[in-house]
């Protein structure tokens, strides 16, 4: 797939800020949880770019193949903690916002596993990955994981 627009060249100042926020938010909770959330939202949104990138990042951070492969069936798989299940339920509820029916029960589970501050951090992460999914799908982006790390390094510099 060829990108329709190079988002980093088209709006460099805003994309640098967006990348910076993305990095900050991603660092606000445990890395394994963050990667599961990124992958699950990307699966729901059909974002091949982000699924590719975040499964590679998850593996690099020690995530197992089993947990990555079972993520789309996390409710039935016994390998996720209660905290991860709460985060995944909240991810699905917010990513599928227009369906609305699961939000209240997802929030109840979230409240039992996350402090108020962590809930905000997780919700920001869900917003960030949904934003990236829309940029990638909308503009036909494909960024290899190594290239993404280079972009992140540029932003951090």
Image (tube, rainbow, N blue to C red):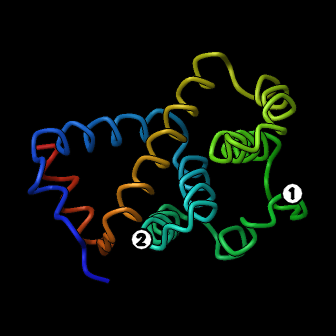
Circle 2 packing at 10 Å, graded few (<14), some (14-19), many (20+), is some
Residue farthest top in this picture: 116
For image coordinates 29% across by 71% down, the residue present is: 143
Image quadrant assignment for residue 60: bottom left
Q: Given this view, does label 1 or label 2 mark the residue nearer the observer?
A: 2
Could you say where residue 115 lies in the image, as x and y percent from the top left? 68, 19
| Figure check: 108 above or below 69 | above
93 left or right, relative to 5: right
For image coordinates 19% across by 65% down, the residue present is: 5
134 or 53, which lies in front? 134
| Figure check: 104 above or below 78 | above
SS category of the residue bearing label 2: helix
Could you say where residue 149 lies in the image, as x and y percent from the top left? 26, 61
63 or 10, which lies in front? 10
138 left or right, relative to 129: left
| Figure check: 132 above or below 61 | above
Could you say where residue 110 lies in the image, as x and y percent from the top left? 76, 30
Quarter of the rendering occupied by the N terminus: bottom left
For image coordinates 15% across by 55% down, the residue present is: 8
Q: Residue 75 carries which label?
A: 1
| Figure check: 84 above or below 133 | above
21 left or right, relative to 58: left
Q: Name the residue under label 2.
A: 49
Alpha carbons under labels 1 and 2: distance apart: 24 Å
Quarter of the rendering occupied by the C terminus: top left
């Amino acid at each position: 797939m060829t990108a329709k627009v190079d988002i980093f060249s088209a709006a460099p100042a805003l994309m640098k800020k967006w990348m910076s926020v993305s990095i900050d938010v991603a660092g606000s909770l445990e890395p394994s949880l963050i990667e599961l959330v990124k992958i699950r939202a990307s699966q729901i949104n059909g974002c091949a770019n982000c699924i590719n990138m975040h499964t590679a990042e998850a593996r690099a951070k020690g995530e197992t193949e089993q947990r990555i492969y079972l993520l789309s069936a996390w409710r039935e798989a016994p390998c996720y903690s209660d905290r991860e299940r709460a985060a995944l339920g909240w991810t699905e509820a917010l990513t599928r916002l227009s369906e609305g029916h699961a939000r209240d029960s997802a929030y109840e589970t979230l409240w039992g596993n996350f402090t108020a501050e962590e809930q905000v951090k997780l919700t920001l992460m869900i917003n960030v990955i949904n934003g990236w999914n829309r940029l990638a799908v909308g503009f036909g982006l494909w960024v290899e994981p190594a290239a993404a790390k280079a972009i992140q390094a540029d932003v951090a510099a």
